[in-house]
Image (cartoon, grey):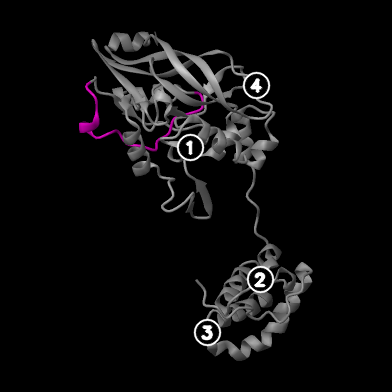
Amino acid sequence: MSTRVKLISALAGVAALGAAAFISPLAADDRPERPDVILAQGKDGLPNSSPVDWVSYGDQVAVVDVTSEAEIPASAEEVAAGEGYIGRRITLDVGETVWSRPGAPTLPSTLSLVVDGWSFQGATRTPIALEQSSRLEPGHTYVLSLAKLSDGTWSALGSQSALPYDGDTIGAGEYQGQTVTTAQFDAAVKSHDKHAAKDGGYVSQGAEVIMESVAYLTVGKPVDYVETLLTTTDPNPVAEANFDLDPIARFEAVAGTDEPVETFCSIAAPLAVASASQFTSSELGGVLDQLVAKESGTDATDLGVLAAFHSGDDSLASQAGTVRPRVVANIEAQCGIEVGDLLPTSTAPAE
């Protein structure tokens, strides 16, 4: 097994709730004089980037100071091989509570966490940091999202749950094993946060709408801004209904929730006169085309003719006039709604 594979395997267990990526290392010219840092990749066990993630799966957000660190010895196999991974356990002093989930367990005044350690080859030891994550090093302050697990231990929520907070400013301090300025952190987040919106607060990925990261939204701000952001953010409703579970089980409940299944009638619902929806001819054709896939036989054929006509095939005008009453009757019978004459309700050009 290569050293790199060993490192990634070891890091998979560093944080119980995961480690993923949103940022690249700083340019070499921006790095302070200190030993190289190995940037490793991992996979988060929980979503932990956006404000919704923090309020859905986190229990507490607090200002913490890292006061000490201790080695977790390498395995006998690694020592014999002369290379491997040395783990690290840190002690945190918990300061100001920034946000608490309703009904959440109380944070103790000190915490002990297992975090990223070092790679070693012979006598050479190199710090390891997960991409887009702080190592949590002694002498630095952080705003940290924490969750209590079912075994009673506390954990950082994930790789993006720690914000550098030296000098009472988010973005100043330790990040990816480097001491960064707020400007450096800001530039890194804006350049690499794959969820950052181009013009506003949200960005669409397919049918999913993803909120910007907490780091993106709060860099350069005081901690009060984080408090306001989180207290005005609603959690995932399934997660909220399962706040009695630990965060891992809570996320499993969310992940196990079936997406609503589109039915013939759910697709047809906007066609109801009572919905007062406005459709151009092409938009109406699009809805009818979706209904075709839910039908078979003559009903599907009728829908297909009408869909094609409203999508621009004028050669089907006569057939469309013939099938329209049948399509109307079919939809109204199946769904219990009135769709009128099933004609366009808007002449505006489709966007």
Give amino acid for label 3. Answer: Asp
Q: CA distance from mark 3 to mark 2?
A: 23 Å
Categorize mark 3 by other alpha carbons within 10 Å: few (<14), some (14-19), many (20+). Answer: few
Give amino acid for label 4. Answer: Pro
The label number, if any, that marks residue 214 in the structure image: 1
In-image side of 244 versus 198 (left or right): right
Report if residue 71 is visible in the image: yes
Give amino acid for label 1. Answer: Val
Categorize mark 4 by other alpha carbons within 10 Å: few (<14), some (14-19), many (20+). Answer: few
* Above-or-below relation of 74 to 101: above
Q: Nearer the viewer, mark 3 or mark 4?
A: 4
Q: Nearer the viewer, mark 3 or mark 2?
A: 2
Q: CA distance from mark 2 to mark 1?
A: 36 Å
Where, by quadrant of the figure, is residue 119 drawn?
top left
Query: For the magenta stretch, what is the residue range?
Result: 16-33
Categorize mark 2 by other alpha carbons within 10 Å: few (<14), some (14-19), many (20+). Answer: few
Question: Which of the two discs, 1 and 4, labels the residue nearer the N terminus?
Answer: 4
Q: Which residue is mark 2?
A: 277
Q: Position of residue 38 (x, y in %)?
A: 29, 25
Give whichever of 80, 15 is nearer the camera. Answer: 15
Q: Which residue is mark 4?
A: 105
Is 30 part of what is drawn in magenta?
A: yes
Where, by quadrant of the figure, is residue 172 drawn?
top left
